[in-house]
Amino acid sequence: MNITEFAQYAGVSKAAVSRYFNGGYLSAEKRAQIEAAVEATGYRPSMQAQMLRTRRTRQVGVILPKLSSDSCPRMVEGIGSVLEESGYQLLLINTANDTKKELQALDTLRQHTVDGIILIAALYTPEHKALLEHLHVPIVILGQNFPGCCSVYHDDAGAAQSATAHMLAKGRRAPGYIGVTLLDKCAGQQRRAGFEAALKAAGLPLHPERMAVAKFSQESGYEQAAKLLERSLHIDCLFCATDAIALGAMQYCREHGIRIPEDVMIASVGDSKVGRNAFVPLTSAHLHYKTAGRDAAALLMDLLADPHAVPRSQMLGFELVCRESTND
C-alpha cells in the first residue's frame, strides 16, 4: 500500500498523512482517522521516502562505554522511551570502555545517516575535543559536562562528599579513598573533589598514602583495597568512586577477616542492585540514571528542532541511601 492508497482508505489528504508521520499539526479528528487506518492496515511509510522528503532518517546514534554496567542500561531505557515517543529509532554502539572505539564511533556516526547523537561519555580527551568541534551533527553528552556541548550530568562531587561525610559523622577519622582516573571528569575528578571537601569540612588532613586509583571493575577494587589495607594505615572508613570498586574492596575485607562496618565502613556512588544485595548491603549515593537518559533525549529533540540553540547543561541531584556497610 502506498501513501495515495492509504490516504484514500483513511479518508484524508496525502498532506495530512505526511504531517501525521512527520510529527506535524493535525486536528484531533483527522489524527483519530489516521490512527484508526494505521491500526486496520498496519501501514508505515517507507524510510527511504521519508529521508528524501525531510532529509531526516528518524534515527539517533547512542554510544555507550559498557553495556554490562548497572548504569548504562538504565540510561538507555530512559533515552529509548523519549525517542519512541518522538518517532525515532535508536542505534546502539558499545565501545567496551575503549577510547579509540568511542572516537571511531563518533566519526562513523558523523559520516552516516543519523539525525543526532547521544554520547554516554567516560573520558574527555584532546581527541574528543577536536572531533566534537567538527562534528556538525547535533549531540548531547550524557554523564559528563563537556565544554561547549549540551550535557546532562550528575552532582558527582556532592554525592561523594555526602557519602564520605556520613562516615565521618559516625566518628571515623582515618578515611581511605579508591577512585578512578582523573581523565574521567565526573567519576574521577568530581568524586575525588567531593571526598577531599568532606575531609576539609571535618578538619581532617588529606593523606595521599591512603588513596588509590582503580579501574572500573570489582577485580581492580579488590586489588587496590589490598594495597591500601595491607599497609597497616589504620584506615577505618573507605570511600569508593563506584559500587563495583566498593564490592571488590568488600570482598577483600571478607576474605581477610576485616569486619564491615565494625573495622572499616565502606560507601560509594551508584546504588546498584548488586550493591543493595551484597553480603553487607552497601551505602551508596543513588543517581537518577533513567531520568538522565530521558532528559538527554529530550534535550536532543530540542536541538533537532533548533540546531542553532545555545548549548546548555543540566545537573541532576542524588540521594544517599544508607545501609549496613556504614552501620545504618
Image (cartoon, rainbow, N blue to C red):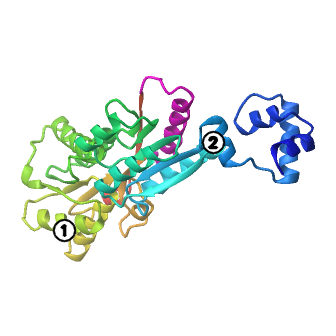
Front residue of this view, candidates 28 and 189: 28
Query: Which numbered marker is on residue 320?
Result: none
Q: Is residue 289 magenta?
A: yes
Q: Which residues are magenta?
A: 288-311
Residue at the extreme bottom: 255
* Left or right: 260, with 307 as reference point: left
Q: Is residue 265 magenta?
A: no
Nearer to me, 140 or 257: 140
Secondary structure mainly formed by the magenta segment: helix
- Which residue is located at x 27 percent, y 71 percent? 251
Disc 1 residue crowd, few under 14, some 14–19, many 20+, Cα 10 Å:
some
Q: Quadrant of the C terminus?
A: bottom left
Q: Is residue 145 visible?
A: no
Q: Earlier in the sequence, mark 2 or mark 1?
A: 2
> Is residue 33 visible in this depiction of the protein?
yes
Horizontal and vertical percent for residue 42?
82, 54
Query: Which residue bears the numbered disc 1?
Result: 223
